[in-house]
Amino acid sequence: MTIDAIGLGLCTVDMLFVVDRQPTFDTTMRASQYLRQGGGPVPTSLVALARLGASTSYVGKVGDDADGDFIRAELEKEGVDTSSFVVVPGALTRVALVLVEEATGERGFTTRPETCADLDPAEFDRETIANARILHLDDADPACMQAARWAREAGNTVVYDGTWLHEDLDEFLPLVDMPIVSEPMVRRWMPDATPQQVVDRLHGYGAKVAVYTLGERGTIVRWREGTFTYPAFPVEAVDTTGAGDAFHGAFIYGLLQHWPVSDIIRYASAVAALNCRQLGGRSGLPNLSTTENFIAAHRGNWDAQITKV
């Protein structure tokens, strides 16, 4: 049976602490809030999609520990299929400590050394990838490379969350239809580039829609009609964890609906903004009605700020 979207990538358990400032060595701090939640870019995007009503499946790798069980249970609770999970006996699942600054919602991450090796291309099959209309990836490693090739051979769309810089990016990006890159990656990949130069380079690899997200400064997008800048929806941010992941999930939802590009970006920007209003990468992910009501209340001002470059 064909599903709407399948994702392949990193999964974690996020342990989030809200603090009034980032700690320094030899100090002790008390957090004002704490939350334990499943995380990882692709799984969180799939949860966003599932809450909007899409059918989703996740290909990931965890240890046979309580943290791996927790990740899987959280995804299943959200309706994300986990039948392609790889469980490694004796391995430790990745756990991330996330410190969230109370005043701004900005955050920093650190992870414990996990003993799960990266997903191997031999650990999933062509049919699993080909049976989804859209493939969502978060890396350019061998597993993602193989999945992208299979998806393209099946005539399906490949969306890429460009968070980490990978040495094989030049080989990988021609396999991607819709690359969405973020500032942290671009600072390492093209440190002196303007936003226009970034989307131009992505377009040069063959991207149908090239997206560069700029946080609270919005988004720049290039596609066949030209290059456009879009604002971010202003919200009082509690935690920006997962904002990009929410954007990617809603972007894929718009693709599934065959919406025009500007409508997709508006919707993705709204879902990202709504997700920043609660602690955790998934707590604030909205359903359809919440998103539509938010857009209806703010669309006029948002649309007025769209600019063709």
Image (cartoon, rainbow, N blue to C red):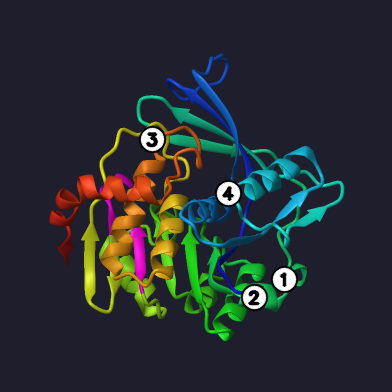
> Is residue 214 a member of the stretch shown in magenta?
yes
Badge 1 is on which residue?
Answer: 121
Q: Which mark is residue 277?
A: 3
Circles 1 and 3: CB atoms closer than 8 Å: no
CA distance separating discs 1 and 4? 19 Å
Identified at 34% across, 44% down, the residue is 273
Front residue of this view, candidates 289 and 112: 289
| Nearer to us in this view, 257 or 70 | 257
Q: Which residues are magenta?
A: 209-219
Q: Where in the figure is residue 258, as x and y percent of width and height?
A: 37, 72
Quick check: 130 left or right of 269? Answer: right
Which numbered disc, 3 or 2, marks the residue that appears first in the sequence? Answer: 2
Q: Is 8 left, or right, of 293 in this rendering?
A: right
Looking at the rendered image, the quarter that the C terminus falls into is bottom left
C-alpha separation, residue under disc 1 versus residue under disc 3: 37 Å
Q: Are dots 1 and 2 in contact, CB under 8 Å?
A: yes
Please say if the residues under marks 1 and 4 sit with CB atoms less than 8 Å apart.
no
Q: Label 2 belongs to which residue?
A: 146
Of marks 1 and 3, which one's residue comes earlier in the chain?
1
Tell me the amino acid under the disc marked 2: Gln
Q: N-terminal of the two: label 1 or label 2?
A: 1
Q: Is residue 107 above or below residue 214?
A: above
Q: Amino acid at mark 3?
A: Arg
Disc number for residue 40: 4
Label 4: which secondary element: loop
Residue furthest right as drawn: 89
Which-is-in-front pick, marks 1 and 3?
3
